[in-house]
Image (cartoon, rainbow, N blue to C red):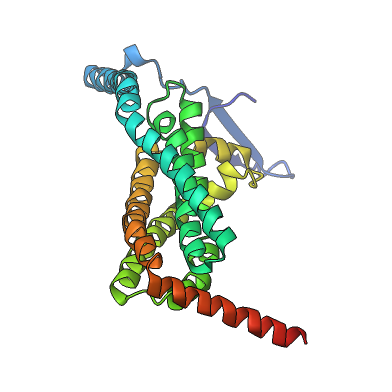
Amino acid sequence: MKGGSISKLIGSRNSATPGPAIIKIEFRRVRKPNRKLLSQRKELIERYVRMAVQRKASKLGQALARKIMRPKLRWAERTRTRVLKSTLETVAFECNRVNRLGFDAMATVLNVGLFFLIAERDLQAVKIDALTHHDPWQRNLAARIMLLTIHELDIDKVAGNKLRQALNEADVPQYLRDAVTEALRAVRKAQSNAQRRFAYLRNATIAHRDGDARRQYRDIVEIDSMTVAGIAAEFYAGTKLFMDVLPRLTLYLGTWPSMSAQLQAQMGRKKLSQTGST
């Protein structure tokens, strides 16, 4: 039987002829509606054309904006990149030096600064690609790297109990402790925002742990680089607060009262370890 709609259903039974009832079903072919665009109403055609033109113009406008902004961003970020590289090298050198000298509190504080500088350097390396690269896949990959960097930071390992102990041993004044706490709170807020909004993207499109490849592809192509850049800006703001307080903090840690307190704490730990070993 060919497809169509049932037009008539007749059930009859001849009383003179015993047997089952005879059911007669008649079908007629139903013409499918014409789906061609030019066969539709004029207002529907005009609406479709307007939407298509708007989508095309939006894509062309975004591509042109990325092409214009890419060299401008590179030029604008060159000073920041140069300063970031120099600061990273200086903090790494000083961190190694004070660690050799045995000033544990100052080494701990500089280690926190070095930790944030490394993460910021990674973000700086892919930020421009995430915003302006001409290839959408490369653009989304850079955005995923930014998300992964912020998402996976284990801040408590460097800025948890060890940092609090260092501030106590160095006898750091309360106003500096409050500044450090405010900066770390801002960094944790940015990380929490990234973890809350992009937890699935981290597992599925960055670590590729989801077996649904179709969903992975859909989420990858729909990543909003501007949203990721906004979260990175929050992270930058938090790390900037810490890097702003770092010179004041290290300046105080280099004073005689603070260095004396650090040496006394170090000697106390050595005596305690020797007592425990004997």
| Residue 3 in sight in this render | yes
Residue 79 as seen in the image, left or right of residue 150 = left
Residue for point 63% across, 46% down: 210
- Front residue of this view, candidates 204 and 127: 127
Q: Is residue 187 above or below residue 43?
A: below
Percent across and percent down for residue 41 are 26, 19
| Residue 153 in sight in this render | no
Looking at the rendering, in which quadrant would you find the N terminus? top right
Percent across and percent down for residue 38 are 33, 12
Looking at the rendering, in which quadrant would you find the C terminus? bottom right
Residue 15, by quadrant, is top right
Residue 66 as seen in the image, left or right of residue 166 = left
Residue for point 32% across, 69% down: 176
- Front residue of this view, candidates 15 and 25: 25
Q: Is residue 180 above or below residue 39?
A: below
Q: Is residue 10 above or below residue 258?
A: above
- Front residue of this view, candidates 227 and 260: 260
Residue 58 as seen in the image, left or right of residue 276 = left
Residue 62 as seen in the image, left or right of residue 126 = left
Percent across and percent down for residue 255 are 37, 68
Residue for point 48% across, 34% down: 142
- Front residue of this view, candidates 69 and 56: 69
**Count of numbered tags:** 0
Percent across and percent down for residue 36 are 39, 15
Seen from this angle, which residue lies furthest front? 256
Residue for point 31% across, 76% down: 174
Seen from this angle, which residue lies furthest right? 278
